[in-house]
Image: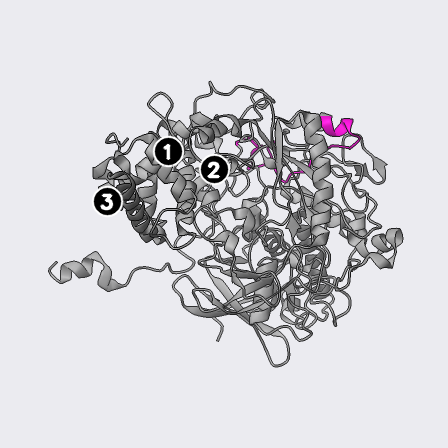
Amino acid sequence: MAAKQADVVIVGLGASGAVLARELTEAGMHVLAIEKGPDYGPDDFWLKFDELRYSARCGISPTMDTDPITWRPNGAATARVAPWAVGPGAGNPLFLPPSLGVGGGSIHWACWFWRQREEDFRMRSVIRERFGDKVFPEGSRIVDWPVSYQELEPHYAAVEAEQGVSGQAGNISGELIPGGNPFEAPRSGPFPHPPIRPSASNQPFVEAASKLGYHPFPAAAAILSEDDGDRKACVYCGFCRDYGCHVGAKAETQNTTLPRAFATGRLEVLANCRVQRVNVDRDGRARSVSYVDARGDVHEAAGDLVVLAAYALENVRLLLASGINRNGAVGKWYTIHNYHWFSGDMPRDTLIYAGAAVGGWVIDDPNANWADHSDGAFLWGSPILYFAGDTQPIEGVRNLPPDTPLWGAGFKDYLRSSYRRRFGMYSQMATLPLESNFLDLDPTVKDPWGQPALRITHNWGDHDRAGGVWLNGIKQRIAEEMGALRTWPAPMEPPYHVTTHEHGGHVMGDDPADSVVNRYQQSHEVPNLFVIGGGSFPTMNGYNPTGTIQALALWTADYIKQETRRGGALTGALGRATA
Amino acid sequence: MTGGTIDATGLLFLSLREAEALDALVARIIPGDAADPGAREAGVTTYIDRALAGPYAEWRLAYRDGMRLVDAFAQASYGKRIGQLADADQDEILAALQEDRVPGFAAGDGARFFDMIWAHTIEGMFSDPAYGGNRDAAGWRLIGFPGAQYGYSADEMRYGADLTGKPIMTLADIRRLADEQPNLFYQRRDHRPPGRGATPPMPPAETTLESDQSQGG
């Protein structure tokens, strides 16, 4: 007997789950949201200025002791608990799944807000048109999305309005707007707020990139550049990534979205409760979810619809732990970003600690299909993002240039001179969906509640290396033009295989034989189950994913509401709720 | 040299001898003196001791055994504990640890012990003074970090700006600001229902004060 009952049970109340919860409660449905992490109050991040707690010790992220993930480079190797995320000094939330709690990953995020380019939705067609079929690697699944930019555009616009995105439009209805991204897909209107203040040392980057023929522009930020209701404009404190915001400027869904959902009186939240599986009836419909509360007691919560919105990795783990994988597609086509970090020191102080990371401008020229990839070395580019804010000392000084002495007077000289002059650039080269990179359940490792850990099988390949070499060449030319004293790239094959930007594993597609969800993120196998988030992305691109994840959540919500109004396939109870 | 900078009464996990040995090592990682503080002056050993007593309990034995081996190596090489050696001799021992040459460690473990001490030295030097290190914001002063600032102005955020004159702020200062001017911070209606929601987990009755008293203490 289920302890709880609702029209819709949502697992995970983060960037996408909160948007869906608001839409559905406002449409009259009763939503029960079950969230693994805490339910943060409005003043919980007033004292967030603490790098040790939130960054070095990963204070709001899922760590390996409670949420183990194992990794192996290939299917023949034995997986170990993520070696880059355990041990002294290993802490960096960037190499874990996103933060937990009501608000989810939208608490920790740096707030880059991108709409995908039109080409990103048509990757197979674009590559084939330019380079022919011969460039697709064996064992890859590079496809067009089953949803188009045009279909998502109104939802992107709605998310930008709801979250309060600050930016400079580059293309409104086909008209190029000076100062914005000239490669941007056509927008129906401008951003709701002007761009945030650039990083202190942004100007040398902009001048250098412009001189080299690139088109720098301010990145869109889900951070307020001006006051909006109870949320204040950004004050540029620099404790941004991995921290909740002390003035509410960051678009965290517990602040931006959920107040409206709570105002309906139809949202109930169970915080600190971990969902362990979806229970499917013999008729093939999801009946309920089982969850364990903070006392360790297991309960059942029943819903006419069940939505998994717990991040790509946890969504996949839950599907597999629930035995929902008839076609064997769950866990396949795992894709992540290689950040190809690139650091340098400038001649003068950069104030690397001040302002949001997203205050660094971007060039989008190297993204997508701009360069000639006809040799097949790599097929899809990435923007290059200037990164010269939001870097506190522990992380900053640990990013050592090669040959830095680790102790003594030489080390002290390094500490005295380098951090204050530091800048960075990074890119987000997407891995290709390959058969060799996939997710399944670890055969031996369990979490403290006895549930199987997720196992990642992934390795960096020639594609990632070729792209990194090419992108770092551009970064190096820009850095030289900026007058950098020295530069150093991160290893081409970084130790991490989780980056807070995991995609795939429950990819969307029209064919139930080779995808997990349909174009509305509805399970092919269990019709009253929706699985939403970056896991649905059939291919990955060079952008931070949250904007698209939230637009897709609205797209899914529209579908659920329409189906319900039609009295259609979805459910009886939802029909009752909105009758 | 040791110089009695360890506050023995405040040690929460390390023994005085272990603390002195560790203090010698961290003082060679970031050397300093009163005018130009390093890790010792910043209280890094106090930071590590408190961390071991709390969140880093899993590394207690690594430190205990590691410091014992380092001290034994100092005794064998120089006839004194590491804390009593001259800087140059301490440097030799630190180099030996980094290069995995200190006897007694399993292969690779000495170098890993160095890496751990190094990582924790960075944390102690550059985390908020609330954690016991970074005394008087010595670490932040060294690298030019203004600390826990509520925010920065457009005038400050310029390439090449000199913010060394800006008063450094810590978590304690932010706490004071939040107490005095809460309107500077985010406010919204708290949606969390008072007195409802999940039942929090509590310790079992036999471990509570009441049960102690009932047993006559």
Q: Secondary structure beneath disc 2? A: helix
What label sits on residue A394 in the rendered view? Answer: 2
* Mark 2 crowd level (few <14, some 14–19, many ≥20, 10 Å Cα): many
Q: Distance between the residues labelled 2 and 3?
A: 27 Å
Q: Give the percent coordinates (x, y) of residue A64.
A: 47, 57
Q: Is residue B16 above or below residue B173?
A: below
Of residue B73 and residue A7, the one placed in the foreground of this image is B73
**Part of the protein shown in magenta:** A208-237
Amino acid beneath label 1: Arg
User: Residue at image x 73%, y 47%?
Assistant: A467
Query: Where's residue B197, x and y in %?
Result: 43, 58
Mark 1 and mark 3: Cα distance apart in space: 20 Å
Dividing the picture into quadrants, the one containing residue B20 is: top left
Give the labeled residue for mark 1. Answer: B28
Whether discs 1 and 3 lie on one chain: the answer is: yes
**Residue located at (62% from left, 30% from top):** A486
